[in-house]
Image (spheres, helix red, strand yellow):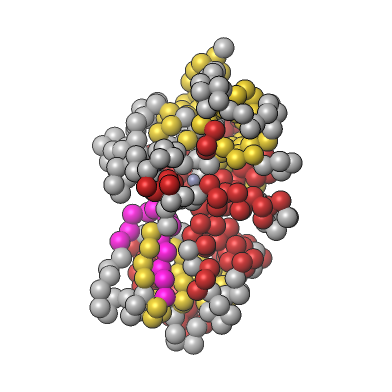
Amino acid sequence: MKMKAYQIVEWGQPAEFVDVDKPTPGPNEVLVRMRGAGLCRTDLDLMDAVPGVGPYATVLPHGFTLGHENAGTVEAIGKGVTDLVEGANVIVHHIHSCGNCVFCLRAVEQHCSTYARGAMSLTRGLGLDGGLAPFMLVPRRELLPIGLLDPVEVAPLTDAGVTAYHAVKTVMDRLRPGTTATVIGVGGLGSYGVQLLKLLTEAKIVALDTNAERLAIARALGADHGVCSNDSASDAVMDLTHGYGSDVVLDFVGSNATLAIAAKISRPQGRIVIVGIEGGSLNVGWGSLATSCEVAISMGSTRADLMEICALAERGRLKIDKELFAFEDVEQAYDRLRKGQLVGRAVVTFP
Ligand SMILES: [Zn+2]
Ligand SMILES: [Zn+2]
């Protein structure tokens, strides 16, 4: 049987609908009937990737179905899968992992040794077939049952939500009462960063963005202050922290400009976490950062992170803003995303 899939066929060409075979699950695989697929700015970067230029077109093979925020129901199970039943609601941890290397054994499978050092991980929707098709094939270990949670509702948690959750988890133990956390870039991922900081820590939260509408949303989600990300942004944060700087900076943009702000507002013994992948760099050395300030790149998430953020959703603790689009209207949804016209995540639904 054939089905339509929305694919990057060649680097440098627009994505397109392609007729592909409906997959059949092999040993330890599960065929998922898609219900919700969240769209991400990374998809636009993939569509815009120039052949031979990183970080995607140099590492990932072309010819794959887009969509790395995936949720649905079990349609069919392969040999060896004994703990899932047909019809069960599931979500996909989009990062592929081997299960056997030292990083997988330490349960930090987003650093799986099967990737080239420093390369983007292979994920479902980035190099491997993702969820913008009626059916998707997933290894059992990359699936998480979600009980009665609605797959359409939680689809945005599988990347936007869980990537932010992972970044917040790396700083949670530092954020005692009286501390400050600054979130740079409060769009799709950063807005989850704000709500998770509010939910899980006692820190004062400063949101920084160039867009006033996004700052207003961040305030509604729990940010104590919204600061326009312009030339005086670092002075504003220093004022808000009485000249001490921010204990934690989560940069969901990662450009030269935002990392320069992060450096200026860093605090002794603070931590700067780079999540955004805009490709900027940060000067590290005496005088460029506060003393003993740490810098980390937060890469993806673990399956345990996904389980934990779903538990928060199950308890009704998360606000998951989204706009729904039918699968055949996916190009319209990407167009709205590109123009910055969406309020919340675009989630594609399937008949
Ligand atoms: Zn994404
Ligand atoms: Zn591995």
Residue 139 image position (x, y, % from top left): 51, 31
Task: Find out whether residue 166 is within the magenta segment.
Answer: no
Where's the C terminus, which quadrant? top right
Task: Find out whether residue 280 is within the magenta segment.
Answer: yes
The region drawn magenta spans 270-281
Q: Residue at x 28, y 38 (%)?
A: 58
Along the line of sight, the residue nearer the viewer: 5 or 163:
163
Q: Residue 185: in sight, yes or no?
A: no
Q: Residue at x 73, y 55 (%)?
A: 316
Asked where in the image residue 265 lies, by quadrant, the reply is: bottom left
Along the line of sight, the residue nearer the viewer: 116 or 29:
29
Residue 54 image position (x, y, % from top left): 30, 43
109 lies left or right of 3: left
Along the line of sight, the residue nearer the viewer: 104 or 177:
104
Q: Is residue 154 above or below residue 256?
A: above
Along the line of sight, the residue nearer the viewer: 226 or 230:
226
Q: Residue 113: in sight, yes or no?
A: yes
293 lies left or right of 217: left
Asked where in the image residue 274 lies, by quadrant, the reply is: bottom left
